Image: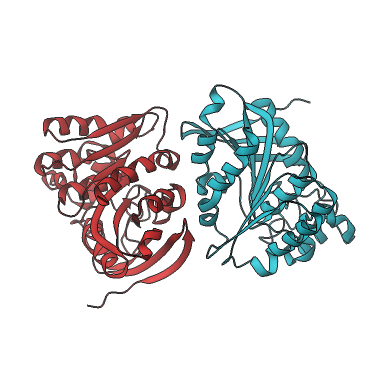
Chain colours: A red, B cyan
């Protein structure tokens, strides 16, 4: 099987290279887009990688355009990889009808129910296929960490917790911590995974902290003025689960901040510094 | 005459307030939008203001979304004000036909030729009306500086050079330094100002350095891979003019950088630090 990818655009940024790429994904059976920021340090040798998983409606562009993360990635010598948030296959019925299901809403699961089962395999895409592509074509060493926002915060927690050997540290901005107990999660999981709620638990961070126990650090930032806080995000559930599982968690409530990229931009420096401690030591 | 404005949205960012506002402009005889970032220091007393003038096709959102400037504004205690790049009056014939004239292309001049003369008064808007509004409704002290990109770099140089008493320092990213000697400038000035090329010179930075002589600092960054460099931007003309006028200019050619906001993001920290020296001392 030949693997290749297309460079759509590359731009110099903070002395490194900001690039936008496409490839034919075997996992999602459709072309997929992703963005990579290579810090200046990548010119002289392989560097560790921080994956950033974005939220509902985003593409691979939002994070690298709006978060101001490249400044810190260049400072610490960390490569940033931002995948798209869903397949965009153009053939899945219903994928374009709602903003919170289908296109832009892959939810980082492997769908098993129709009509999603053919293309919507974002869990395997993020955990397996994309890192293999990065390892083959970019100057990355084997060290990886994962971060994300909202739906992507859920993705970061799930991908991170389930893969102790792949990710050294995990962080999230305003994550959906318990999708089996919120409206977004119910809508998505019932469609992508079907009615057997037992199968949903493999993608619920509050369940996973009990089943994948280790002491890797977790950092979560949550804005107190986030309009999704009470109904969808519910970070106190993760705090309770981590306490029960005796797992370290740093949950920071940030007063006045909302759900936007202005919130992410304000604290992404802390997150990259946090990951760099585990990636660069 | 009563003056008022509408707050469309406010968000916490780096401990300060990122806001988007609208008001009925007397100068442009149409509603105008602008963005303001108030650093945390503005909660306890008035702070200086840095105006950022954006380039062709931009709105008041591009700079505050993509440049990562709030981090530095919060560090130095500088308010950022980003106006829109043109009136959007909906009635000027031809304003929507081309990306480089009319809507999104105000060019920071006071138009005198029809059909632009009614609304297209961006010079007076930026220099007079908007600062008066900021002074009245925001915690700003009397210290101002100005920065801009491309068309807005031209605007920053022109507004800055012509108003020694209003702006303490001037900087630009990839500015159009000699609009009387480039295709964009010829197209705009012949439409907005008419055929008498003598009237164009009041909006040409390379002319103005000879007529408004002082020793305020000028900082210009230019990417060497900018596709507009040779035909439209021509920074060497500013260097020659400043040498002839014995005026200080720091012109930095940045190898490999293009015309994008990734270029701006990479060096906006230097620019805000530069302005803070004159605004905060």
| Quadrant in the rendering for residue B144 | top right
Q: Residue at image x 46%, y 52%?
A: A65
Say how many tags the image has: 0
| Quadrant in the rendering for residue B250 | bottom right
Q: Residue at image x 66%, y 60%?
A: B99
Q: Quadrant of the N terminus of chain A?
A: bottom left
Residue B134, x across and y down, in percent? 67, 31
Residue A279, x across and y down, in percent? 26, 51
Q: Is residue A244 above or below residue B224?
A: above
Q: Is residue B104 visible?
A: no
Q: Is residue A206 above or below residue B213?
A: above
Q: Kindly give the residue lying farthest to the bottom in the view shown.
A: A2
Q: Kindly give the residue lying farthest to the top in the view shown.
A: B44
Relative to B278, is A14 on the left or the right? left
Residue A260, x across and y down, in percent? 43, 40
Q: Nearer the viewer, residue A211 or A144?
A: A144
Q: Residue at image x 85%, y 54%?
A: B113
Residue A116, x across and y down, in percent? 25, 58
Q: Residue at image x 79%, y 26%?
A: B1
Relative to A188, is A68 on the left or the right? right
Q: Is residue A270 visible?
A: yes
């Amino acid at each position: 099987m030949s693997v290749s990818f297309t460079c759509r655009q590359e731009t110099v940024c903070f002395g490194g290279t900001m690039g936008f790429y496409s490839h034919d994904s075997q996992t999602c059976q459709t072309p997929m887009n992703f963005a990579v920021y290579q810090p200046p340090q990548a010119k002289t040798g392989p560097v560790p990688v921080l994956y950033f998983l974005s939220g509902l409606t985003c593409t691979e562009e939002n994070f690298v355009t709006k978060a101001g993360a490249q400044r810190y990635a260049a400072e610490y010598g960390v490569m940033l990889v931002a995948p798209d948030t869903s397949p965009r296959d153009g053939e899945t019925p219903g994928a374009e009808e709602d903003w919170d299901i289908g296109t832009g809403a892959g939810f980082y699961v492997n769908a098993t129910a129709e009509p999603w089962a053919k293309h919507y395999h974002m869990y395997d895409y993020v955990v397996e296929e994309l890192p293999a592509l990065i390892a083959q074509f970019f100057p990355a060493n084997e060290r990886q960490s994962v971060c994300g926002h909202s739906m992507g915060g859920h993705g970061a927690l799930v991908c991170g917790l389930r893969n102790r050997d792949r990710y050294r540290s995990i962080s999230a901005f305003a994550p959906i911590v318990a999708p089996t107990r919120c409206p977004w999660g119910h809508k998505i999981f019932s469609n992508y995974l079907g009615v057997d709620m037992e199968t949903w638990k493999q993608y619920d961070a509050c369940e996973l902290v009990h089943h994948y126990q280790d002491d890797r650090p977790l950092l979560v930032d949550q804005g107190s003025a986030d309009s999704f806080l009470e109904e969808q995000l519910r970070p106190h559930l993760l705090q309770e689960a981590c306490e029960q599982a005796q797992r370290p968690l740093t949950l920071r409530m940030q007063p006045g901040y909302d759900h936007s990229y202005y919130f992410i931009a304000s604290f992404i420096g802390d997150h990259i510094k946090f990951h760099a401690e585990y990636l660069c030591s």
